[in-house]
Image (tube, rainbow, N blue to C red):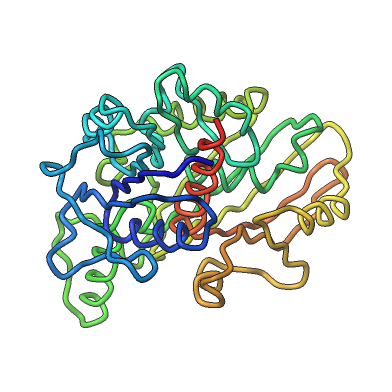
Amino acid sequence: MANLRLAIASDFLLAEKLLETLENSDLNIEQITAVELESFGEEHSLRWGAKAVPQLTLDEVDWSQFSHVLFAGKMAQAEVLAKAVQGGCIVLDLYGITALIGNVPVIVPSLNNEQIVQVRERNIVALANPQISQLLLAIKPLLDQPIDEIFVSSLLPSAYFGDEKVRELAGQTAQLLNGIPLDDEKPRVAFDVVPANVQGEEAHLPFSRAFALQIAKIVPNLTPRITFHALQVPVFYGISQMVTVQSSYPIDSQALSQQWQQQEWLTFHEERVMTAVKNGEEDEQDTALQISQLLTLSEQSVQFWSVADEQRFSLAFLAVELLREVTEY
């Protein structure tokens, strides 16, 4: 495995989680640098083990100095990604802003790794959206049998929409608890639930089209069979999903639970219901997809509940696993 000259281009909180995950990996990293897509602020510094991590602004970075880039930027920062590619870097697009480009592979690590070979087309590979990777890793044992319909209700925390939304939730919660009314023109985040695509940048993104095209690149036969309902909820971290799977053939829930117990990166809870808050509080070192409340609705239908930390698991952990696979090509 070649030595990596790695750049992390993201916000500060995700950069921290990526560095923590990289520190626990066995990747051969020659150098690692953080690129501030948004200013970290003078008081924020990063460490990788015992070493301080250099932090560069976009004006200071020379992309030719890096072999790989973990890029977690928004659509408005696509030009930065393009400059990294032009500088000779292999770019791992963690937010999937390039997923709509025809020959850019979209990967859920361990599910469709064979498609990583397509990275040679543009030197870009996209990590699947956290909602998609959480769902597909959960239903991985069922992908070998015909599936009629999959219904997914995704409850999305503030962190899914970025650091600013987390700060908004904290500020609004404190303000309302102190009896101070909110500005009527400000979108409500605290103590409310809204469709995920009505606030901020999300209001301008073609959610259904983007999801359909990502899924089509990963598991083409399932594209017309999956329906997502996405809601923004007043939770800081952790995506929760209620999933119903319907098949024309019997689904053996006992066999499914046994397969989950053997599946890597996944913890199945037979007796208790795991929540996003419990997942975040109980063991920060246990980076896994948590599944519970498996119910048999009929002979051909099952329902289950899953939670995952979209920062530590769906972005940081899966990004490092994707990087590991990319370095083998």
User: Left of 323 or right of it: where is 166?
Assistant: left
The residue lying toward the viewer, choosing from 174 and 308, is 308
Image side of residue 61 versus residue 226, left or right: left
Snapshot quadrant of residue 251: top right
Q: Is residue 139 visible from the viewing direction of this image?
A: yes
Pick the residue in front: 167 or 242.
167
How far across and how far down the image is residue 183, in percent?
13, 62
| 92 in relation to 305, above or below | above
Q: Quadrant of the N terminus?
A: top right
Report the side of 313 relative to 137 (left or right). left
Kindly indicate the quadrant of the structure image that contains residue 104. Answer: top left
Task: Please state if 235 lies on the left or on the right of 178 as rendered.
Answer: right
Residue at x-position 31% and y-position 53%: 162
The location of residue 19, given as percent across then percent down, is 39, 59
Q: Closer to the camera, 312 or 269?
A: 312
Residue at image coords 15%, 48%: 57
The quadrant of the picture occupied by the C terminus is top right
Residue 41's place in the image compared with 179, above or below, is above
Q: Is residue 197 visible?
A: no
Task: Please tell me which residue is depicted at 52% across the width and 22% down the height of the picture.
Answer: 118
Q: Is residue 82 above or below residue 243?
A: above
- The foreground one among 173 and 162 is 162
Total labels drawn: 0
* Residue 93 placement (x, y as % from top left): 39, 37
